[in-house]
Image: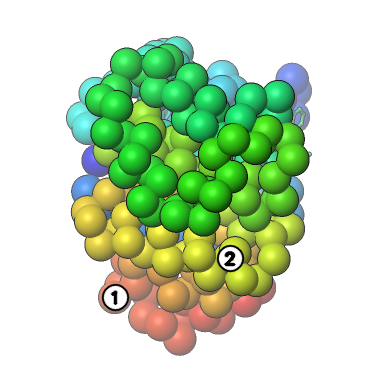
Amino acid sequence: MLTVEKLNVSYGRAQVLFDVDVELQAGSLMCVMGRNGVGKTTLLNAVMGVVPTGSGRVLFEGRDVTKTPTHARVKAGMGYVPQGHETFGQLTVAENLWVTLEAVGGPRTAVDEALDLFPALRKFLKRRAGFLSGGQAQQLAIAQALVTGPKLLILDEPTEGIQPSIILEIEGAIAELHRSGLAILVVEQYLEFALRLADAFVVLDAGEVVHSGSREELGDDRVRRLLAV
Ligand SMILES: Nc1ncnc2c1ncn2[C@@H]1O[C@H](COP(=O)(O)OP(=O)(O)OP(=O)(O)O)[C@@H](O)[C@H]1O
């Protein structure tokens, strides 16, 4: 479904990703792990076209999207929830969802479906997004990405800075999306969350892939050892 081939990314003269290969199968939930600053966010941003790539290719459903603008990748079915759960703070929760729907021209039922996954948001439909807690804003950011009708959902640290009770709600929603067959690529440093959810892993170190494979290929003990670093 998503293939990253020999991807190299630099910021000015500083190279951050080196020949990165990733293969995400349809229906898989793949977790990208690694210490701070190894290039995880850069990888997601490059997959979405938010940062330019030096060399290498990104293929989505077999189509080369390396030069495709981000908005066209979203329309093609790549939903993205960047780090920091950014929403339109001045708009209400409902307006955030409708504005996103308008931008992609999806079916109106997409808003209800996204809210079904995060029922807690229904209580806040008229609240400005800027007044939500971090956890609620993260739920709204994921709901917004779902409204775009993704075939692949890309999430950057969905649990970062979020209170434990809402982490469980977010984990439940992601597990449900995975069960429904959606392909998911997630950067996540919270080991237990990753171990409970993912069926495939990529471990980055200093911009290189040092381990990758399915849970069966790597084995649970090895995954735990690799990810605990
Ligand atoms: N816009 C930028 N301009 C210059 N350097 C950057 C930029 N964004 C990231 N970097 C650098 O690139 C490297 C990789 O950063 P990146 O955010 O991709 O790592 P990360 O693994 O996601 O880290 P974290 O877990 O802290 O979010 C770091 O050294 C970072 O300082």
Q: Which residue is mark 2?
A: 167
Identified at 59% across, 23% down, the residue is 51
| Residue type at numbered disc 1 | Glu
Q: Position of residue 189 (x, y in %)?
A: 62, 63
Q: In front: 56, or 194?
A: 194
Q: Name the mark on residue 150.
A: none
Query: Left or right: where does residue 14 sit relative to residue 88?
Result: right
Colouring convention used in this rendered image of the protein: rainbow
Query: Left or right: where does residue 90 sit relative to residue 30?
Result: right
Q: Quadrant of ligand 1?
A: top right
The local secondary structure at tag 1 comes to helix
Q: In front: 126, or 177?
A: 126
Q: Which residue is mark 1?
A: 216
- Is 186 situated above or below 152? below
Q: Quadrant of the N terminus?
A: top left
Q: Position of residue 29 (x, y in %)?
A: 35, 58
Identified at 25% across, 25% down, the residue is 107
Is residue 6 in sight in this rendering?
no
Q: Position of residue 76 (x, y in %)?
A: 29, 23
Q: Residues within 10 Å of mark 1 (few under 14, many from 20)?
A: few
